[in-house]
Image (spheres, grey):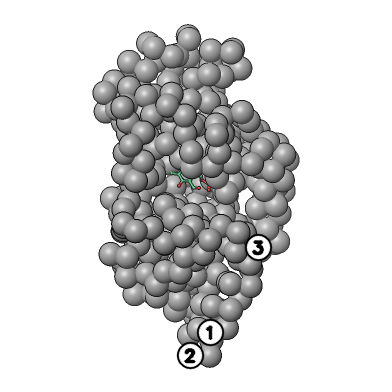
Amino acid sequence: MRLDYPRKIDLACTPTPLQYMARATDEWGGGHRLWIKRDDLTGSLLSGNKVRKLEFIAAHAFDNGYDTLITCGGLQSNHCRATAFVGAQLGLKVHLILRGEEPPEKDGNYLLDHLAGAQIDCYPTRVYVKELESLFQKLQDDYAENGHKALVIPTGGSDGIGAWGYIAACEELRDDFITAGISRAHIITASGSGGTQAGLTLGAKLHNLPATVWGVNVCDDEQYFVDKVTSDVADWRCRYPGVPDCDMHPRVLDGYVGPGYGVAEQEIFDLIAHLARMEGIVLDPVYTGKAFHGMITEIARGRFDGVRDIVFMHTGGTFGIFPQRGGFS
Ligand SMILES: Cc1ncc(COP(=O)(O)O)c(C=O)c1O
């Protein structure tokens, strides 16, 4: 289907490779072929899934006269780090509102946020959860008073603008499928703020990608993500009234959050270490490790029977392993 994309600024190294995982297929495939879409390779500092969304968000900022980006996330947010580097690369100020007490040592994404020169405010979780909207508003007002126009980017860059990133990625996947000889697939991605899943689910429909998209939630639950994906898509329709209509049905693989968001059991760390040696691919304990674990568990349960190919979206997050180094035995 022909789509009128809004402008984007080229920031991501795309197309990313779709790689076959031969040894993982032998170990966990259960008759399926396992592939990995290497969106961890969209860049080095500007890496992972967030960059695809930020290409459209940054263009929106420039085209509407914003000179500052404000966004939020956990202390180790990949989205915040990517936004900090987008700002540094494009000459925009970046202000981050981070959830959690300021840590004594700067590590992982949090260290990189500082290196990129972002302005950073940390808030205890209780305050962050209760007051995020007013913190955003106050910062926006402060910037306005000082002659700046600040764009508030929601958690994970997940809204109707960010959705374009993975709608466009589905065109790339369509070409990948042809090259790889994939006629039908299940696509598995980690869901944290729902935007990647929303873009992929919508993009698969719009571009006739022969695939069923599943989000593995790393926080909250199935209903939360069905609602979140639906609301991101509604926001997309509302912002771009000419876009085509299509039915879509968000699918969630629930049950893999483990002890909680950002906290992983030993088996996730062991799986990450095992895959690193087996395939030379490094996942993270917050998002991709849990999603991969969900994928191989559901394969073993027969969830994907009848479809030969399974594509795992590697959405990045590698810097998140450093502050959790203690989990690797
Ligand atoms: C590495 C990584 N993978 C997956 C996700 C989930 O993507 P989304 O927020 O679009 O659901 C995130 C962010 O939340 C992430 O940082």
Does label 2 point to a residue whose CB lies under 8 Å from ligand 1? Answer: no
* Number of the front mark, 2 or 3: 3
Q: Mark 1 points at which residue?
A: 142
Secondary element under disc 1, as helix, strand or loop, is helix
Name the residue located 39 percent from the left edge and 12 percent from the top edge: 27
Q: Can residue 108 be seen in this view?
A: yes
Residue in front for this viewpoint, 154 or 20: 154
Q: Separation of disc 1 and disc 3 at Cα?
A: 20 Å
Q: Name the residue under label 2.
A: 146
Q: Do the residues labelled 1 and 3 touch (CB within 8 Å)?
A: no
Residue in front for this viewpoint, 57 or 146: 146
Q: Residues within 10 Å of mark 3 (few under 14, many from 20)?
A: few
Label whose residue precedes the other's in the sequence (1 or 3): 3
Secondary element under disc 3, as helix, strand or loop, is helix
Give the quadrant of the N terminus. Answer: top right
Q: Are marks 1 and 2 in contact (CB under 8 Å)?
A: yes
Give, as a three-letter code, the residue at label 1: Asp
Q: Residues within 10 Å of mark 2 (few under 14, many from 20)?
A: few
Q: How crowded is mark 1: few (under 14 residues within 10 Å), some or many (20 or more)?
A: some
